[in-house]
Amino acid sequence: MQLLKILLGAIFILSGSILFGLVHAAITIHSAGYTIENFFYNVYWTRNLVPYILGVLQLILGILLIVLGLRGEKAVEAEEAAGQEK
């Protein structure tokens, strides 16, 4: 189960990164003079913030799943070690 959390987290991080890349590619194609300082003006070209919000949520969810998966693995290992000591 812990490995599944880690794999799902990696998938969410990958898909979130791809989404950010696609949105920035679309902005670059449609707006001349794309700059980081001009972020909110460039967001206008996408017509909404949904891709950004979805990308951020995917990245956060992916990180949380990986952290929870790694913590759960450590807890299982500690429980197994405590069981072997008895």
Image: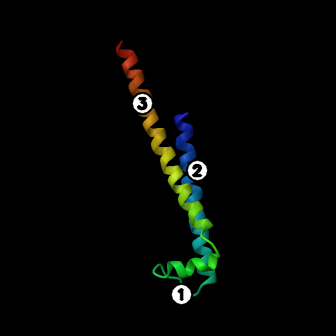
Secondary structure type for disc 1: loop
Q: Amino acid at mark 3?
A: Ala
Viewer-proximal residue, 6 or 65?
65
Q: CA distance from mark 1 to mark 2?
A: 33 Å
Q: Residue 69, labelled with which disc?
A: none
Task: Please provide percent x and percent y for residue 33.
Answer: 53, 87
Quadrant of residue 44 in the image? bottom right
How many numbered dots are placed on residues in this image?
3
Quadrant of residue 67 in the image? top left
- The residue labelled by disc 3 is 75
Q: Amino acid at mark 2?
A: Ile
What residue is at 42 percent from the left and 22 percent from the top?
80
Q: Are marks 3 and 1 in contact (CB under 8 Å)?
A: no
Answer above or below: position of 2 versus 38: above
- The residue labelled by disc 1 is 33
Quadrant of residue 70 in the image? top left
Viewer-proximal residue, 79 or 41?
41
Secondary structure type for disc 3: helix
Viewer-proximal residue, 56 or 83?
56
Answer above or below: position of 29 versus 71: below
- The residue labelled by disc 2 is 11
Pointer 1 or 2: first along the chain: 2
In-image side of 42 versus 36 (left or right): right
Pointer 2 or 3: first along the chain: 2
In-image side of 35 versus 32 (left or right): left
Pointer 3 or 1: first along the chain: 1
Mark 3 Cα-neighbour bin, 10 Å: few <14, some 14–19, many ≥20: few
What residue is at 61 percent from the left and 66 percent from the top?
51
The type of colouring in the image is rainbow
